[in-house]
Image (spheres, rainbow, N blue to C red):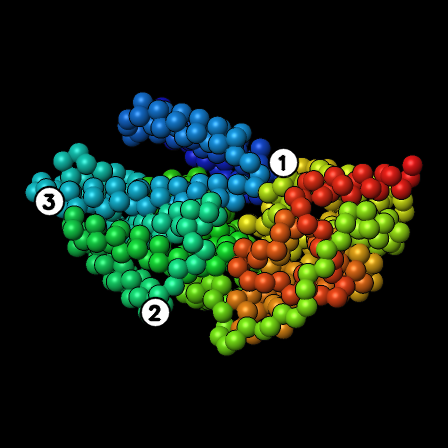
Amino acid sequence: MSLLPTLIKACYFLAALLFILGLKRMSSPRTARGGIVWAGVGMLLAVLATFFLPDMHNRSLIVAAVLIGVSAAWWTGRRVAMTAMPQMVALYNGMGGGAAAAIGAVELIGYARALGLLHVVPDTSPLQPESWAINGLPPLLSPVELSLGVLGALIGTVSFSGSLVAFAKLQGWMDKRFVFPGQRVVNILLLAAAVVVGVVLASGHVSGPMIALFFVLALLFGLLMTLPIGGADMPVVISLYNAFTGLAVSFEGFVLGNEAMIIAGMVVGAAGTLLTQLMAKAMNRSIGNVLFGSFGAAAGGDAQTIDGAQKPVDAGDAAVMMAYAERVVIVPGYGLAVAQAQHKVWEFAQLLIKRGVKVKFAIHPVAGRMPGHMNVLLAEAGVPYDLIADMDEINPEFPATDVALVIGANDVVNPLAKTDPASPIYGMPILDVSAAKHVIVIKRGKGTGFAGIENALFYADNTRMLYGDGQAAAGQLVNELKSLDD
């Protein structure tokens, strides 16, 4: 039996290595699938090792919970469409934050119950020489453990409620933005109040009403911090709450003395923080603005008037333009995902390549509804990685591009981000599609994008609109291109 704690810690160490190596492999599309498997094996190992902890109780309930969670994840993972993957990520991330918050709540409630008991004896355990055991209950938390438990509960609760709002917005159940006068002040006051109550709890003054007030304030702050966020900034929100959840799990892991939780949480928190910084840079926003600003809000003033009209083109003319072009850049967006047009678009690209046309795919860092969304769709269709270029790489090539084909992208190609200070997306780096010699946009209709603003690109002199469903329009282009060779 003396070997058991050592074996458990060895399993946790191996699981941590698999987490880190798996995350490293996820950095490349070529090895990402294997990285996910490695990390999954690490998590399975950590869960199994936890069942053998000497002081583990209620194993039957834990097994039941694991089976329910795995079944739900398997079912949703198989049935949820790729277009709904961002909201599923937001929902699952919220569940992780909620789990960390629940751990903090249980620890605080246990601490309050322990303080109400009279019989207090020193705990002589060599693992916690300065702690106290009370009538068989777990030892009282040390001041550091109590502080980290409160901090993890605060962060996890904010991530939970904020992620649920993000899910509702992405699912279309809620308006994209909700703003009221003085909202920023209210948010700051809510956060300050939650921190003050948290400090009181961390100082050892734990009671039922204080715990309830703490979680209510944290929940409200998470809700109100996310409500004013516009759809164009949702990728930043998802990565931010991902970092929050990781940190919360790590802090609660310290409270529980669970090395696997500490390391896994830190890895997720660090990765989420770096991703948030990259996304904020891609949106031209500071981290402070991400935390406390009203995302997607206009900078103020009157919006620019867009002159001209949208000019339609039929599939035959569009196919001819690209068939005899030297360079074509294809820009996919969320509309491509909705139409599930990635396979038809890749078929069309292959036909162009056979004709000697140089084809590339351009990906904006926040294309779609979350980072990497478009990359996953293109990889699913079999597009080679060397044909996919990011924004910084492809932007200098647009002036030498004969035709830029935009499919379902809107805000990430909108020139107003550079020209209109009153635009909600002003200052956001964009794909310089308007610099191409000709632009063809496949779009269902004349509606606005997720940010809810008009796109000046659609009215430009060098732009033609091919209206219709993305998959159907791509299929027409394929047929027209094939007919040129008959």
Q: Secondary structure at mark 1?
A: helix
Identify the residue at the far right of this view. Answer: 486
How far is disc 3 from disc 2 in space, using C-alphas?
44 Å
Residue type for callout 3: Gly
What residue would you read off at disc 3?
A: 116
Q: Position of residue 78 (x, y in %)?
A: 53, 29
Question: Image point 92% across, 36% down: which residue?
Answer: 486
Question: Image point 80% across, 38% down: which residue?
Answer: 479
How far is disc 3 from disc 1 in space, using C-alphas?
51 Å
What residue would you read off at disc 2?
A: 181
How far is disc 2 from disc 1 in space, using C-alphas?
46 Å
Question: Image point 35% across, 24% down: which residue?
Answer: 64
What residue would you read off at disc 1?
A: 33
Are the residues tagged 2 and 1 within 8 Å (C-beta)?
no
Front residue (pair 231, 9): 231
319 sits left or right of 39 in the view: right
Does the rendering let one see residue 350?
no
Residue type for callout 2: Pro
Q: Is residue 55 above or below residue 293?
A: above
Does the rendering let one see residue 339?
yes
